[in-house]
Image (cartoon, rainbow, N blue to C red):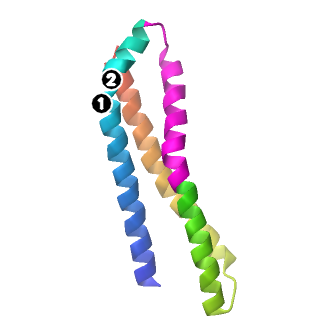
Amino acid sequence: MFSVGFLGLTFLITSGCILYFKQVEEGDEEQPNYKILRKLGFTQNDLLQGILRKQLFNFGIPLVVGLMHSYFAVKSGWFIFGTELWTPMLIVMGLYAALYSVFGFLSVLHYKKVIKMSL
């Protein structure tokens, strides 16, 4: 159980960091585009709404796939253990979603900083 938990946590942190740094790089590359959009009359809120949708897509799909993978992995483990362990599974899936959401939140904060610098 320890090795499975350790590997799962390592995968979560690794994939979250990869997505976060990819978004940071894209945000820095898109800064000239935000300058143009600001000159065209888009407000900060308009840009932030677009960024929130983008981050929901970029972090939401891997999160859903990871949660589905966790569910089916635990469900196959129930066959081995002979019992259903709903409470631990839901706790772990909740922690997984919370930790993954932190990376998405940090990414949105970086984009806010990029938008402010594009003024």
Label 1 environment density (alpha carbons within 10 Å; few <14, some 14–19, many ≥20): some
The x, y position of residue 86, in whole percent, is 68, 76
**In the image, is 52 to the left or to the right of 17?**
right
Residue found 57% across the figure and 76% down from its top = 73
Q: Which residues are magenta?
A: 40-62
- On the image, which quarter does residue 94 sit in? bottom right
Q: Are marks 2 and 1 in contact (CB under 8 Å)?
A: yes
For residue 64, above or below residue 42: below
Residue at the disc numbered 1: 28
Left or right of 7 in this view: 29 = left
Secondary structure mostly seen in the magenta stretch: helix
Q: CA distance from mark 2 to mark 1?
A: 5 Å
Asked which secondary structure carries label 1, the reply is: helix
- In the picture of the structure, the residue carrying the numbered disc 2 is 31
Where residue 40 sits in the image (x, y, percent)? 45, 7
Residues 76 and 118: in front is: 76
* Residue at (46, 49) in percent of width and height: 102
**Residue 96: percent from left, percent from top:** 52, 62
Viewport quadrant of the C terminus: top left
Residue 13 in the magenta stretch? The answer is: no
- Whole-percent x, y for residue 44 in the image: 47, 18
Q: Amino acid at mark 2?
A: Gln
Please indicate whether residue 59 sits to the left or right of residue 31 in the image: right
Q: Amino acid at mark 1?
A: Asp
Which residue lies at the image location 38% right of the left edge and 22% below the top edge?
115
Report the residue that reaches farthest toward the top. 40
Vertical placement of residue 24 versus 18, above or below: above
Quadrant in which residue 39 is drawn: top left
Mark 2: secondary structure: helix
Q: Residue at x 44, y 79 (%)?
A: 4
